[in-house]
Amino acid sequence: MTHAATTPATGPFPQGFLWGGATAANQVEGAYAEGGKGLSIQDVMPRGITEQPTEGPTPDNLKQTAIDFYNRYAEDIALFAEMGFKVYRFSIAWSRIFPNGDDAQPNEEGLAFYGRVLDELEKHGIEPMVTISHYETPLNLARGYGGWTNRQLIGFYERYCRVLFERFGNRVKYWLTFNEINSVLHEPFMSGGIPSPRAELTDTDLYQAIHHELVASARATRLAREIMPAAKVGCMILALPVYPLTPSPDDVVRTMDTAHASYAFGDIHCRGAYPGYLLRYFRDNGIDLDITDQDREDLKNTVDFVSFSYYMSICESADPDVEKGPGNIMGGVPNPTLEASEWGWQIDPQGLRVVMNDYWERWQKPLFVVENGIGAKDVLVEADGGLTVEDDYRIDYLNDHLVQVREAIADGVEVLGYTAWGCIDVVSASTAQLSKRYGFIYVDRDDDGSGTLNRYRKKSFGWYQEVISSNGAAL
Ligand code: BGP
């Protein structure tokens, strides 16, 4: 059967589609040493992933104060409500709840803060979605235990989850266990609290750490079902569709291998066991992991849905001389047919449709797009309604990507919702700067830390408001 050209999908999104935005604690809250919070790995990453971590916290780390969400959350959530958000994805800073990660008792002041955030969301009828661990491992678990290479972290994480589920289980339905869990392959410190740089880490240690995280994720899922039967638990994957650079079978096979490295995380979360291609990789590379029978049982607690971030696609080539380009953590071989953002991340709206079809067919679990957006150097300008940013480039990027979400829905993919990344400007994860902005809301703060922290609605604010109020028909 041949397909005629498909008719582009138009009209509104499914009823109840969850429109919203996403942030992470370390990138918005600030108050890094207030309210009983302990240090996290982010407090020693003043340059993000571009430089080695520092010994202790340094005042040039913008995340120490970030955008002061810790004090301004009510104002910010009111702005989200004004845009019409149905859902807000945020993370809980592990070291606000367990300052050292291994404490016997949680920090009540930290729990009280998130209780206040939830109050505000409830006041506006916004559904919360919580990332339990978003690049914020308590520093003590990294430096004192070796991060996720240490099996003890499973127990510490489970204790932390139990506290969250018991305290907030009747208020939060959507939970994500680990942000971009596959990113640990490239950023072991930021993603897995593992102190050794990637080059000094053996594959065995890396995959043992990954195994511990996967078991922790599955145990959290089981615990969630016991404590909050109505909850929905998702994994969170950094989606980076990989295309062969040429039609050469060598490139195609290489593309498959590269794709497998990330698929493995979804396969284990959705199928409850290690896939054959990963077991083969272990055999071929002499990787011998400590996997207990109990671990195998635990892994069978599969997730309810698959969430993912999507910013770009990459190419892959079997030719070792082909150079890789920049990108969301992993990067990859640039695609000669695509344009790129100011940071060299290639823009590929159709890749989002491709990856959604791919994940849906592979796992048959509902999808949630929990990050998407374009980092840009916005300029604040004077306009009729006051200061704003004329961010047509952001509107174009988001519009083009949402059109592809609609296409995927028309293809039959089940999609729960969409949260635009950095719905308010946040400190960038990779650069730790504020000049790489994603928001619908501009925050007056510069990379040198100066600025009033005032919030201003960008042009995209009104655009997203219309998209939401028309349930996508305005795209
Ligand atoms: C993802 C992270 C986010 C976020 C986003 C944009 O990898 O989950 O925390 O920051 O990418 O990346 P960046 O801030 O480096 O532009």
Image (cartoon, rainbow, N blue to C red):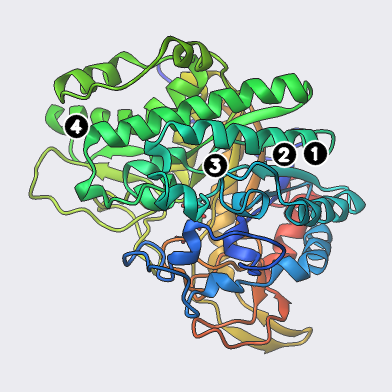
Give the residue drawn at x 34%, y 63%: 344
* Residue in the image at 42% along x and 68% along y: 431
Q: Residues within 10 Å of mark 4 (few under 14, many from 20)?
A: many
In the rendered image, which residue does mark 1 sit on? 167
Q: Amino acid at mark 2?
A: Leu
Image vertical order of residue 46 relative to residue 475, above or below: below
Q: Quadrant of residue 145?
A: top left
**Is label 1 in contact with label 2 (beta carbons under 8 Å)?**
yes
Q: Mark 3: give few (<14), some (14-19) or many (20+) Cα within 10 Å.
A: many
Q: Amino acid at mark 1?
A: Arg
Q: How far, Cα to Cα, is label 1 from label 3? A: 38 Å
Give the percent coordinates (x, y) of residue 352. 48, 41
Quarter of the image with the N terminus in it: top left
Q: Is residue 42 above or below residue 472?
A: below
Is ligand 1 less than 8 Å from the beta carbon at label 1?
no
Q: Residue at x 86, y 56 (%)?
A: 120
Left or right: 85 in relation to 418 = right
Query: Residue 94, how many percent across, how many down?
Result: 61, 49
Q: CA distance from mark 3 to mark 2?
A: 35 Å
- Residues 300 and 156: in front is 156
For image coordinates 62% across by 53% down, the residue present is: 93
Q: Looking at the picture, how far across and down is residue 392, in whole percent? A: 58, 69
How crowded pointer 2 is (Cα within 10 Å; few <14, some 14-19, many 20+) is rated as many
Gap between marks 1 and 2, in whole Å? 5 Å
Which residue corresponds to mark 4?
254
The answer to whether residue 314 shows anywhere in this view is yes
- Tell me which amino acid carries mark 4: Arg
> For residue 209, what is the image quadrant?
top left
- For the residues labelled 2 and 4, the Cα–Cα distance comes to 41 Å
Q: Nearer the viewer, mark 1 or mark 4?
A: 1
